[in-house]
């Protein structure tokens, strides 16, 4: 189990994380979310042992995770960190980058493992290509495979699919997260993308103002968005009479006390997102077809 106890950290004098407490069970997938600058990357780096804490402690089981003040070499064998900058070796091939930290004493084992990882990140075709010629998304996949090569106990992923195109993202995400789950590798993911979270995370930790604003399952937080920040992570939402209402929770009815004027239609594939005016506010709702601008319609809340 990973235990984060009363962790506080500042860069210079600016407090980034203040009295953070949470724990992660073996094999769990945890999403760290929060606005840009809320401290997600900093938290991952602290978990990796890259910086010294101002106060508090970090434990993986009985092993304390300590920063550079206590360790000559940063990091531990059981934990891998895939940063937003990938830090690969550009002049050797994809296969060589992945196999770099695998023992040459067992060449067959090494070859098998490299092949398996190339499949996980869908890069088999690129095995012999030099990394410097790869695109950003391909490099990101090499970095992922390399971090998994020696099968860590915990993997820390910073925006792991941010450079991957939409054509590949879904299948790659499924492959990687299912692989981690099968191998019972504990996984902590800093992300802005709800698709990394909804289907895969056991829990979400939301950082705001240096503290944890929420720590619960994706399903619970999606269904009970107590703050605008939580709601905005999942979907388009409105605040109606101090209540958070997702756009998909509003439907057109014959008559109600929510009378709106249609302003704009946004095509979303399976539905239209309609922007409308309600008194002095903007209200978004979903509808199966386009509505004429300037029309008056009535909405009801279906929760
Ligand atoms: N090395 C550093 N020295 C000083 N301040 C830093 C350093 N790294 C980050 N910060 C600051 O700490 C805060 C948190 O940064 P961090 O990168 O952890 O946020 P984040 O939530 O990961 O953001 P993003 O979603 O944009 O990646 C930011 O205000 C940032 O400017």
Image (tube, rainbow, N blue to C red):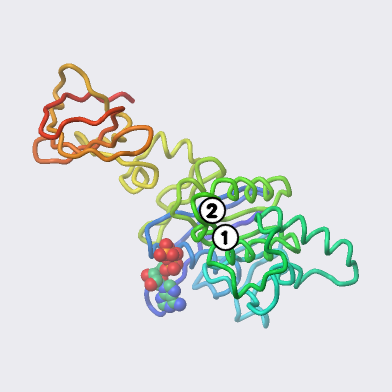
Q: Horizontal and vertical percent for residue 91?
A: 66, 79
Within 10 Å of the Cα at label 2, are there few (<14), some (14-19), or many (20+) other Cα atoms? Answer: few
Q: Which mark is residue 55?
A: none
> Quick check: can you spot residue 15?
no
Image quarter for ligand 1 equals bottom left
Q: Which mark is residue 22?
A: 2
Q: Is residue 303 left or right of residue 164?
A: left
Quadrant location, the C terminus: top left
Q: Is residue 147 left or right of residue 277?
A: right
Q: Could you tell me if the residues under marks 1 and 2 are in contact, i.e. CB atoms within 8 Å?
A: no
Residue depicted at x 36% and y 41%: 235
Mark closest to the chain's N terminus, 1 or 2: 2
Q: Horizontal and vertical percent for residue 66?
A: 62, 72
Q: Could you give the CA–CA distance between mark 1 and mark 2, rounded to whole angstroms?
A: 18 Å
Q: Quadrant of residue 102?
A: bottom right
Q: Is residue 297 left or right of residue 32?
A: left
| Total count of labels | 2
The residue where tag 1 is placed is 157
Q: Nearer the viewer, residue 16 or 176?
A: 176
> Quick check: can you spot residue 13?
yes
């Amino acid at each position: 189990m990973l235990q984060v106890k009363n962790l506080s950290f500042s860069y210079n004098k600016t407090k980034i994380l203040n009295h953070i407490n949470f724990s992660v069970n073996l094999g769990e997938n945890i999403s760290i979310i929060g606005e840009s600058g809320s401290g997600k990357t900093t938290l991952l780096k602290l978990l990796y042992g890259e910086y010294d804490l101002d106060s508090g402690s970090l434990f993986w089981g009985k092993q304390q995770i300590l920063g550079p003040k206590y360790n000559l070499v940063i990091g531990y064998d059981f934990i891998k960190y895939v940063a937003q900058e990938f830090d690969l070796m550009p002049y050797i091939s994809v296969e060589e980058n992945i196999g770099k930290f695998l023992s040459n004493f067992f060449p067959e084992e090494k070859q098998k493992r490299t092949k398996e990882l190339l499949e996980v990140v869908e890069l088999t075709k690129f095995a012999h290509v030099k990394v410097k010629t790869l695109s950003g998304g391909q490099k990101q996949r090499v970095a992922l495979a390399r971090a998994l090569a020696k099968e860590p106990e915990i993997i820390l992923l910073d925006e792991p699919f941010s450079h991957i195109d939409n054509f590949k993202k879904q299948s790659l995400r499924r492959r990687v997260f299912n692989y981690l789950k099968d191998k019972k590798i504990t996984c902590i993911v800093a992300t802005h993308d709800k698709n990394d979270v909804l289907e895969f995370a056991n829990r979400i930790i939301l950082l705001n103002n240096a503290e944890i604003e929420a720590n619960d399952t994706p399903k619970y937080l999606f269904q009970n968005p107590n703050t605008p920040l939580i709601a905005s992570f999942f979907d388009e939402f409105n605040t109606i009479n101090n209540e958070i209402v997702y756009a998909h929770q509003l439907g057109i009815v014959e008559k109600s006390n929510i009378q709106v004027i249609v302003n704009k239609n946004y095509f979303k594939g399976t539905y239209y997102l309609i922007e409308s005016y309600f008194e002095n506010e903007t209200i978004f709702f979903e509808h199966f077809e386009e509505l004429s601008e300037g029309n008056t319609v009535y909405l009801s809340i279906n929760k």
